[in-house]
Structures are given as structure tokens and as C-alpha cells.
Amino acid sequence: MDKNTTIQLLNSMKRLTNIRIADTIQPDRTFLLMHRRASGAFFMWIINILVWAIPMVAQTPETTVETGNRSTATVSSMYERGYFLDSALGNYFEMPMSKPFAELRQLAYEAVRVGAATKNLRLEARGLQRLVQIFTLVSNQTDSALLCSLHALQLARAAGDTALIGSILLITSLTYLDNFNNYHQAEDYAFQCVRIAERIGQMPLVGFAFNIIGDVHLRLGNPREALPFCRRSLEVREACGDNPTNIAWSLHNLGLVEQALGNIDTAIVYHRRSLALWQAAGDAHGIPQAWKNLGVAYSLKGNHTEAIAFFHKSLELRRAISPLSHFLPPLLTLISTEERNAGQFTASLGHAHEALSIAERGKMQQSMALACRELALTQKALRHFEEALRWQERSNALSDSAARTTMQRAITEISTRFRIEDDAARQATQMRLLEQNNQIAELQLQQQRQTQALTLMGVAAAVIGSGLFFQRYRFRQVLQRRTEREAQRTQISRNMHDEVGAGLTSISLLSELARLSTSPEIITQHVVKIQNTSVAIGNAMREIVWSLNPKNDVPTIFLPYIRAFAGEFLSDAGISFYGNFPDFDAVTPVTKPASSIVVRLTSVLPLVLTQFVSKHFLNSSLPANTSAHEYHFNLTGEARRAVFLVVKEALNNTVKYASATEVRFVVRIESNGYEFTIADNGRGFVLADVPPHARVNGLENMRKRIEDMHGTFHLDSALSQGTTIHFFVPFSA
């Protein structure tokens, strides 16, 4: 055999053992079952691989890729061989297998080798998938079967072949179920297969997976929970026209479930149906299983003669498949039990000894313990009590040894896999460090060249970005001022219409009435009304102009104006006025910069840009001849007008209805706004007695004006105790 071929084969086998710990370790009670004999037979598995693979490779056509002289023809033949092997391995979930086990085993090994050489992950996974079936059905290499199935699953996932992943999940589930009695893992992989197969429409896989789940519940002693899964499996397989031999497996499980539920006659019907399908398909693995099922069913009915006959038919077929199959010892033990129950003690001892011999050669400790127990029972039936005791003690010792071996192998498996993963991680870390050292030298040189260019580009980008930002900011300011002007114009037109329009209409009507009247007294009355209306219009115009002038936003101007108006208005009505207005220099406001983003930007910008921002943005909103301290107390023109109208309405109500002799007007500046208090010593009133129309036009109007500015309004009044109005206006109004 060629040296390169041997190296490639060994590398392929090395990959078979590189299974992650997470795929085989479960942190629950099923941990020991899952790892039963998983590591003790590891090196034996390697030896068996070499024994089978080396002669096989020597007989296969030369497809090795030469290291020194790799010819195009050799590479082409390697890939062509891969295509042939992919087809020869059969369908993903083919049961029964269409080729003899010896031929299929040779094809599977070659598929693993060619797949590894050509980096064909799918072909390599398919070869491993077939090896799992061979290890399980022929050579009883359960540990090798588990390792191959887990590695095949990794390769299939890396290849991204969903259908192949589903079929390998099935094989892995069967491996955990039949070889390790790990029901938790078997059910988990079967449910994963169901989800994948339903998504891609592979209903045969769905039927297969449901059958495995039903088998899991049956082995756990829950036949009623197993029944719906087994029925669903049969329905799916029959609906999609699955292979008859696969339908037979669903019938097989349904028979076992009915048998466990005590429906023996129904179970026999299912077993005979499965036998007929397997015989028609020539399934060498299914037919002996059906004979065994019938034997168990007739044994439960008490027909030991029929049971023994069926068991012997199954035994004959099992021996033809493999003389060391793990199916043989349990079957021989069943025959021995039936022969003992039928009184055939000599035949019973012979079959029990044969079961023990095969189990010893295959190192099947659990089967050895069962065979020894059967020998003990037979010797007891023969009244050979000392011999029976000896076999029973050996059975107990084998059971204990099996438990200890399982635990020791699990511990060894864990330590081995941790060591393998730790070594792999260490090697990967060393490789990364070496690559990083090589990259650092290149990066340092690149960084030296790029630093200056990046610095210049960064400065240029900062300047350009700052310019664009400031241009956009200025544009938004202009747009905001334009919007405010439009709003002011709309407000002016509304105020002019409300205040001046009504007055001019009144003057027009009064003038017409005076012109048509012939009585001097009536004409005089109309002229007086025209004069009063003109004065009111003039006052309204002055108020509108006053509210629109931004110079009046400063409190040192608008508060004296309100005080002067209140004093003059109350003086004309003969009411004493006492005013208490604030000293602005004694108050420290809570400031909030109008352009906080711009202020933060100036801390990181160059000096020239900082001066530009400070000049055009930070101080651009301060009115002329206004100190920064006064500016914090400003109100907008609309807010000043609303405050003035509320004060005017309050004083007008006092003059008209309160019969007061004194009014106190107090204005205080809080940290976040103005607080106004207007109190009189008049007769007061009860709010409930005020007519609704007067309440809406007067008091509610004042409240609405204040609340529209996000302020608060409160009125206190009682009969003979005067009236006090409190309202608060925030600086943000």
C-alpha cells in the first residue's frame, strides 16, 4: 500500500475521534448510560479500523494525490470516484441496505478516505453514517458507532446538507437507544430530526423519528404515552408511500405497545403484518425481529412450544448475519427461559451457556449477567442449589462490575476529552499568537504611513463637518425666526380683528345713529360713546404694539408698565393701590443655556472656530442693551400680553363687582418663574353663585390664559372676606 494513502487514512481516522465533549456529555442521571463503554474500547476501535482499512485500501484503485507531482488526471479520478461512492452508498435513510454488509463496509471506508482527501464533507459524513450501521448491526462495536455518528453529524452540519443532518440525527438517536439505553439523548435527537424533516418536507424521516420516540416511551415503561407516537409514525409512513420495510417497523412498535398494554391478540396481528412486509422486502434484519416478537407474544399467552419455534427461526437468521451480533445473547437467553418453563432443562442449559459464551467474546457484561441469572434459575429448577447459588453470585458480580466499568469509562472519557480539547485549544492559541506577531509587524509599518494621512483627513473632515453643521444650524435659526414672525403676524391680525374691528364697527353704528337722530341729547350720548370707544381702541392698539416690541421682554420694562397701569386704573376708580415688585439683582435664576450642543462643541474646536461660534451663535439671541442677568427673566411678547390681560381682567372685576377700597398687588420672582398675587378687601363671592356665562367669560378665561403658558391659577374668595388671585408663570412661557 502507498505511503501517502496510509497517511490520509490515519488522518481520516483521527478526525473520527475528534468529537466535542458537549455532544456526548449530559449533566443528568443518563450521563453514565450515555458513556457506557464509550472510552474503554477506544484503542480497540482504532486497531479494528486499521485491520479493516489497510487491506481494503490495498485492493482499491489508485486514487492517491501525489505530494510532489500532483497530476490533473489523478485529481480528476479522485473526484470521479467520490461521485461514484456517493451514489453507491444509497439513499440517506435507506433501510434495509441494498448491498451486502462486506461490500457496503468497503465502500464506506473508501468514502471516508476520499471525502477527507477532497475536502468533501458530505461524502465523508455519508461514509461515517454507513459505518455506524455496520458497527451496530454486524460487529457490535457500539463505542465506534457512537463516535462515528457524532462526528458524521458535525460534518453534515458543516456541509449544510439539511436532509443528511436529519438522517444522521436518526442514526445517532438509534445508537443511543439500542447501544447505550440513553433514552433522554435518543428522544432529543429524534425530536430534532422531526423539526428538520417537517421543515424540508421529508416525511419518511418524520415517520422514522416518531417511531423512535414511541420506542423510547415503551422502554421507559409508558406504553400509553408511546401509543400516539407509534400510531402517528404509521400514519405518516403510509400517507407518504414510504418503503414497506419502514412501515413494518412502525407495525413492529405498535405490536410491542399493544403487547405491553395486555392486548396480546392485537399485538400478534401487528407482528404478522410486519413479518409479511419484511419477508416481501427481504429485510434480513427485520424478519428475525418479527419472529422474536411473535415468540414473546405466544410466550405471554402460555404457548411455550410455539414461542420456542419462533425464537429458533429468529436465532437462525441472526446467526446468518453475524455470529457475534449483540442481538444473539438476549435471544438465546429468551429461548433458554422458554425451554426452562417447558421443562426442557438440558436444552435450556445449553442455550444459556451459548449466550454466556457469545457475550464473553463480545465483552457484553449486561448480557453475561442475564445469562448467568438464567443458568442459576435453571439449576434451581433442577434442585442443584449449590450450582444455582454459584451462578447467581456470578450474575450479581457481573452486574456490579458492569456498573463500576460504566462509571470508570465515563470518567476516563471525560478526562480524555478534556485533555484533547485542552491540547487543541492550546495549539490554537499558539497559532493565533504566531499569526498575530506576524501581523503586528505589518500593521506597525502601515500605521506609520497612515497616521499622517488620517490626521490630515480627520482635521479636514472636522472642519468640513463643523462648517456644514453650523450652516445647517444657522439655516434652522433663520427658519425658526421666520416661523415666529409668521406666527406674530397671524396673532397681530387676530388681535386687530378682535380688539379694533369690533370697536370700529361700534363707532360706525354710533355715527350712523347720531346722523339720523334729531334730538341733541341723543346725539351727545352717541358722541360720548364714540369718544369712549375711540379711547378703548387706542388703548388696545397701544397694548398690541407694546406686546410686540421685543425691548419690552425685559422685566425691568414690562413689570413697571403693568404697575403703572394698575395704579392709574385703580386710582381713577377711587381705590387705594399697594404694589410690591421684585429687585432683580437679589435673585439668582436657574439657567439653562439655549445652545448647549454648541457650547459643548466649542470646548473641542480650534480657537478660530470657537470664536466664530461664540460670535454667531452663543450671544446672537440677546437683545441690545440687555444684560445677561436680566435676559434670564424675560417673557415672550405673547406671554407678556397674556399676563397683562389677566391682570386687567382681575382689576376690572374688582372695580365692577367687589366694592373694594384697597387692592394689594405683589409680584415675586422664584427660581423658575413669576408668582403674581392680586388681593382686594371687597365683599367677596361664592364661586357657585356666579352665573355660568360670567364664569366662562371672566374667571375661566383667565385660568385658560395662564394654563396655556404651562402656569397655574388659583382663586380664593369668601363673602365679606375679599378676593385673592394667585397665578404662576414660568420663564419658559
Image (cartoon, helix red, strand yellow):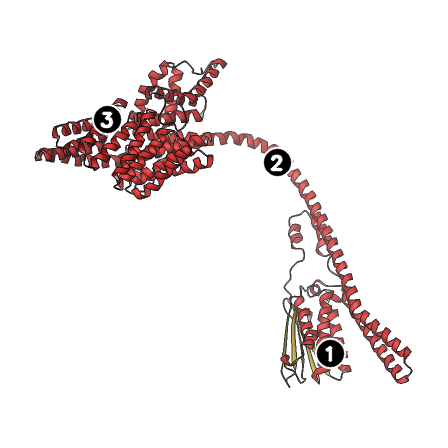
Measuring from the top left, give residue 203's x and y in whole percent. 42, 34
Label whose residue precedes the other's in the sequence (1 or 3): 3
Q: Which residue is mark 1?
A: 652
- Rendering quarter of residue 581: bottom right
Identify the secondary structure beneath mark 1.
Answer: helix
* Quadrant position of the N terminus in the picture: top left
The x and y percentages for residue 349 are 14, 29
- Camera-side residue: 492 or 170? 170
The amino acid at mark 3 is Lys
Crowd rating for badge 3 (residues with CA inside 10 Å; few <14, some 14–19, many 20+): some
Q: Position of residue 686 (x, y in %)?
A: 63, 81
Q: Residues within 10 Å of mark 2 (few under 14, many from 20)?
A: few
Lateral position of residue 442 relative to residue 197, left or right: right
Q: Secondary structure at mark 2?
A: helix
Quadrant for the C terminus in the image: bottom right
Please, is residue 526 above or below residue 550 in the view?
below
Between 206 and 498, the one nearer to me in the picture: 206
- Kindly report which numbered mark, 1 or 3, lies closer to the viewer in this rendering: 3
Task: Check disc 1: other Cα within 10 Å, few if <14, some if 14-19, many if 20+.
Answer: some
Mark pair 1, 2: CA separation:
75 Å
* Residue for badge 2: 451
Q: Nearer the viewer, residue 281 or 588?
A: 281
- Residue denoted by label 3: 313
Q: Nearer the viewer, mark 3 or mark 2?
A: 3
Which amino acid type is shown beneath numbered disc 2? Thr
Q: Tell which circle, 1 or 2, labels the residue nearer the N-terminal end.
A: 2
